């Protein structure tokens, strides 16, 4: 069976703003409230997580992720209101693309 796959990457001025890995990171941060937990759950380095967040926040007109470094009460991370909106819109786009790809896969395998 032939199968088409589609991975969505949204770019701004040539730089990757959102992609499947970055949106997975946003979802993990939302779930955990912690960069270290998100990195651990995704099995990627804490430094890589920081790099992705800095990249997204630098490209976006408003920060997607609000981070607090550790301290007496520990750090924390949250998705901003803007980040929630962007993630929701990305997931809507992804769902629509999945429908189109599913139809293409049906048609090419007839």
Image (cartoon, grey):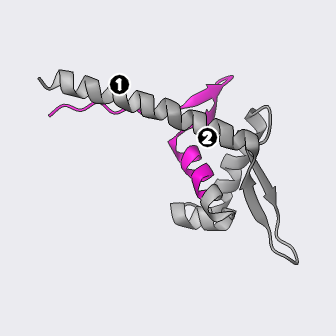
Front in this rendered view, residue 58 or 91: 91
Q: Earlier in the sequence, mark 1 or mark 2?
A: 2
- Point out the residue furthest to the bottom here: 72
- Asked if the magenta segment contains residue 105, the reply would be no
Vertically, is 21 above or below 5? Answer: below
| Most foreground residue, 102 or 60 | 102
Residue 87's disc number: 2
Where in the figure is residue 78, as x and y percent of width and height? Answer: 73, 56
Confirm or deny contact between disc 1 and disc 2 (CB under 8 A): no
Residue 76 as seen in the image, left or right of residue 18 = right
Quarter-wise, where is residue 95 in the image? top left
Which residue range is magenta in the image? 1-28
The residue to which callout 1 is attached is 100
Q: Position of residue 41 (x, y in %)?
A: 53, 65
Q: Is residue 9 left or right of residue 50?
A: left
**Residue appearing at x 18%, y 22% in the figure:** 108
Tell me the quarter of the image containing the C terminus. Answer: top left
Q: Position of residue 98 (x, y in %)?
A: 38, 32
């Amino acid at each position: 069976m032939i199968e088409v796959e589609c991975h969505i990457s949204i770019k701004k001025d040539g730089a990757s703003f959102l992609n499947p890995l970055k949106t997975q990171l946003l979802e993990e941060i939302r779930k955990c409230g912690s960069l270290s937990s998100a990195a651990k759950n995704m099995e990627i380095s804490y430094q890589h997580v920081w790099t992705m967040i800095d990249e997204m926040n630098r490209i976006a007109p408003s920060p997607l992720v609000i981070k607090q470094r550790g301290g007496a009460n520990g750090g924390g991370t949250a998705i901003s209101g803007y980040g929630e909106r962007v993630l929701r819109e990305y997931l809507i786009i992804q769902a629509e693309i999945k429908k189109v790809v599913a139809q293409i896969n049906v048609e090419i395998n007839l």
